[in-house]
Image (cartoon, helix red, strand yellow):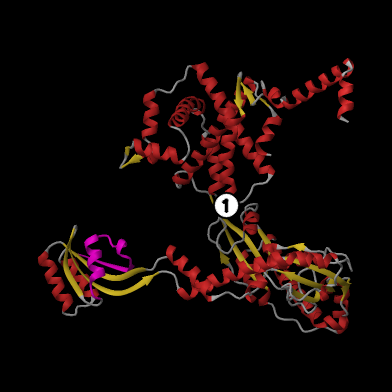
């Protein structure tokens, strides 16, 4: 072959062909370098200035790190985060361009003042340069970059505050909004609970059968599926794992290094200003005076009584007192002890230790070790289980050494057995739900397939029988029919009484008189607003009451009966009566209008400066 190639190269046409090939391969090998020459990294252009993708990526990554604390965000969320980062970069360039056009600058003195006022950079209220550098280092930002941000912020405020300074809502608008928000309504209500209705006598059997025929959905048994199931789960296997006591003890020793046992003492302390007073109090206490008596005496001597419960030595405010307390014998009055704030007289009332409960911690460690062994066993057995299923081995003939939990039975889509009780599917709720979902998605007699379940578990099942939904025979559900008929009759009777009361009130009769004639007590509600229902008044009823005129009534069915309510009165507070809420309305409206003005201003800058975004480059940020 090589000889043939050498002979071919003797032909000048072939030589030319190979030269072209070599040139192509050389160029192909360095194409990445060639194509990178002049490669565009500007994700957007605004006001004649390019925004490099790296600046947007930096802001995007910071926001993404925060979002990931509550779980991995999806593509739509990542795109939104990237869009916010790009918009922030665009706004800054637009504002900087407008500030340059108007001659707005940030004086050094203003920048310095803004930085000095940041609490994170202060020690005892004074700017601390060491703290400044430490905080910036912890947040991975250079001093120059941070000062640049502050400079932009100072200049931006000069521009934006001038734009939004005149934004204010008209007084009439504030008054109208306050009127809607602060308006209070009172309702007079009557409750007609189902429990207050007499239980009707059972009807004739023909009536119940007619009810059964007219309500087939209520008496239809759900679809049932008969399944065979095997589960391979670390959580189910773990309790059967054996763990050596030596392993538990070793793990416990490691755990207690991070959770040391700490001595604690409970102590009653008198902080006394001078030695003479401390001697008087000490003598009384040693003669057997109760702590309550000592607290009273302390006040007459200008002393302070303090009681500490289960305090570690570092938690005691005075080092001298802490040392003395932990050196004193419990139950004895000790002192006086000199300290920085006076003399101390005290009595240790209890001593104990704080630290891990050995029995509980060892039990927890044993469970963790069992779970670890079970996870290892499952990882080893799952391949054998997969091979057995691939070979069409029936579930009831799988090897007995795979750590499987097997189950066979009938259940509905809610996970209930035929008698209505919960099917005895082992494992947590997530595993049970996954099994039920798979059982009702698997075709009849379909070969078992291995399914990845939650918590590192696996399961496989077959559906051996399907019972379709069917109306249950009357004889089988006769008691259930009677119960349903009785509940309907009670609800119908309560509804009729409520409707009669409603018609009487809306027909012009006084609410109290109409309710009294029906033998029903009335209740006046507390004041309610559109945003704050009164106690005992549902949000649904509140919303209806704010559509009524005084004297009008409404009726609402609740979970346990009916409510009839009349709008009794409307109270309209004035701004003078509630200046705090009125001020909040004014501030909210002013803030809203300022936001609108600011957004309109920025939108105008974008339209003027012809913002252009490279969508392909932008998509690389979040994909």
Q: Position of residue 437 (x, y in %)?
A: 78, 64
Which quadrant is the C terminus positioned in?
top right
Number of numbered tags placed on the structure image: 1
Q: Is residue 133 left or right of residue 491?
A: left
Picture layout, residue 313 above or below residue 401: above
Q: Position of residue 79 (x, y in %)?
A: 66, 39
Of residue 212 and residue 551, the one placed in the foreground of this image is 212
Q: Decide if residue 480 is in sight here.
A: yes
- The residue beneath circle 1 is 531
Q: Residue at x 84, y 21 (%)?
A: 18
**Residue 513 among those drawn in magenta:** no
Picture layout, residue 542 above or below residue 611: below
Q: Quadrant of residue 376?
A: bottom right
Q: Quadrant of residue 347?
A: bottom left
Q: Is residue 391 left or right of residue 237?
A: right
Picture layout, residue 539 above or below residue 428: above
Of residue 281 and residue 530, the one placed in the foreground of this image is 281
Q: Position of residue 273 (x, y in %)?
A: 15, 61
Picture layout, residue 373 above or below residue 108: below
Q: Quick one: which residue is furthest to the front in this view?
A: 3
Q: Residue at x 56, y 75 (%)?
A: 244
What range is drawn magenta here? 303-329
Q: Position of residue 361 (x, y in %)?
A: 49, 71
Of residue 200 and residue 86, the one placed in the foreground of this image is 86
Q: Categorize mark 1 by other alpha carbons within 10 Å: few (<14), some (14-19), many (20+).
A: few
Q: Circle 1 — which element?
A: loop
Q: Is residue 433 left or right of residue 359?
A: right
Which quadrant is the N terminus positioned in?
top right
**Residue 314 among those drawn in magenta:** yes
Q: Quick one: which residue is furthest to the left in this view?
A: 276
Q: Decide if residue 558 is in sight here.
A: no
């Amino acid at each position: 072959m090589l000889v043939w190639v050498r002979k071919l190269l003797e032909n000048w046409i072939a030589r030319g062909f190979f030269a072209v090939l070599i040139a192509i391969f050389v160029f192909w090998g360095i194409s990445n370098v060639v194509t990178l020459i002049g490669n565009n990294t500007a994700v957007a252009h605004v006001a004649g200035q390019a925004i490099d993708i790296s600046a947007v990526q930096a802001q995007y990554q910071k926001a993404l790190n925060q979002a990931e604390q509550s779980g991995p965000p999806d593509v739509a969320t990542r795109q939104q985060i990237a869009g916010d980062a790009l918009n922030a970069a665009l706004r800054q360039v637009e504002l900087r361009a407008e500030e340059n056009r108007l001659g707005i600058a940030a004086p050094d003195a203003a920048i310095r003042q803004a930085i000095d006022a940041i609490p994170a950079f202060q020690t005892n209220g004074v700017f601390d340069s060491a703290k400044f550098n430490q905080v910036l280092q912890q947040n991975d930002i250079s001093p120059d970059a941070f000062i640049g941000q502050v400079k932009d912020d100072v200049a931006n405020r000069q521009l934006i505050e001038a734009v939004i300074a005149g934004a204010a809502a008209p007084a009439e608008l504030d008054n109208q909004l306050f009127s809607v928000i602060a308006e209070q309504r009172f309702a007079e209500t009557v409750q007609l609970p189902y429990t207050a209705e007499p239980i009707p006598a059972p009807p004739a059997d023909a009536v119940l059968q007619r009810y059964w025929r007219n309500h087939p959905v209520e008496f239809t048994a759900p679809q049932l599926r008969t399944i065979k199931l095997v589960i391979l789960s670390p959580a189910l296997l773990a309790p059967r794992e054996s763990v050596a006591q030596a392993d538990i003890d070793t793990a416990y020793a490691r755990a207690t290094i991070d959770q040391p046992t700490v001595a604690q003492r409970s102590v009653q302390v008198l902080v006394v200003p001078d030695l003479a007073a401390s001697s008087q109090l000490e003598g009384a206490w040693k003669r057997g005076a109760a702590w309550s008596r000592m607290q009273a005496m302390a006040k007459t001597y200008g002393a302070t009584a303090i009681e500490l419960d289960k305090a570690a030595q570092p938690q005691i405010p005075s080092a001298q007192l802490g040392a003395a307390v932990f050196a004193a014998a419990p139950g004895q009055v000790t002192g006086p002890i000199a300290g920085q704030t006076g003399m101390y007289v005290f009595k240790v009332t209890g001593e104990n230790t704080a630290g891990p409960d050995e029995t509980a911690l060892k039990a927890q460690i044993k469970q963790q070790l069992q779970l670890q062994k079970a996870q290892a066993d499952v990882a080893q057995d799952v391949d054998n289980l997969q091979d057995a299923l691939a070979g069409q081995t029936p579930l009831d003939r799988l090897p007995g050494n795979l750590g499987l939990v097997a189950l066979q039975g009938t259940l509905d889509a809610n996970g209930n057995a035929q008698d209505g009780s919960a099917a005895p599917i082992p494992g947590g709720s997530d595993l049970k739900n996954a099994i039920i979902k798979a059982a009702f998605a698997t075709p009849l007699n379909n070969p078992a397939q291995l399914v990845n379940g939650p918590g590192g578990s696996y399961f496989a099942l077959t559906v051996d029988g399907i019972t379709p939904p069917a109306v249950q025979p009357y004889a089988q559900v006769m008691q259930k029919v009677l119960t349903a008929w009785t509940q309907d009759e009670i609800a119908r009777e309560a509804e009729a009484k409520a409707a009669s009361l409603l018609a009487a009130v809306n027909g012009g009769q006084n609410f109290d008189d109409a309710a009294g004639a029906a033998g029903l007590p009335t209740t006046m509600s507390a004041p309610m607003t559109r945003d704050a229902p009164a106690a005992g008044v549902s949000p649904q009823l509140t919303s209806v009451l704010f559509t009524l005129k005084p004297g009008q009534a409404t009726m609402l069915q609740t979970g346990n009966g009916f409510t009839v309510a009349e709008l009794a009165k409307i109270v309209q507070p004035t701004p003078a009566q509630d200046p705090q809420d009125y001020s909040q309305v004014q501030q909210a409206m002013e803030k809203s209008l300022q936001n609108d003005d600011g957004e309109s201003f920025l939108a105008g800058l974008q339209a003027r400066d012809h913002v252009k975004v490279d969508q392909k480059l932008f998509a690389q940020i979040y994909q």
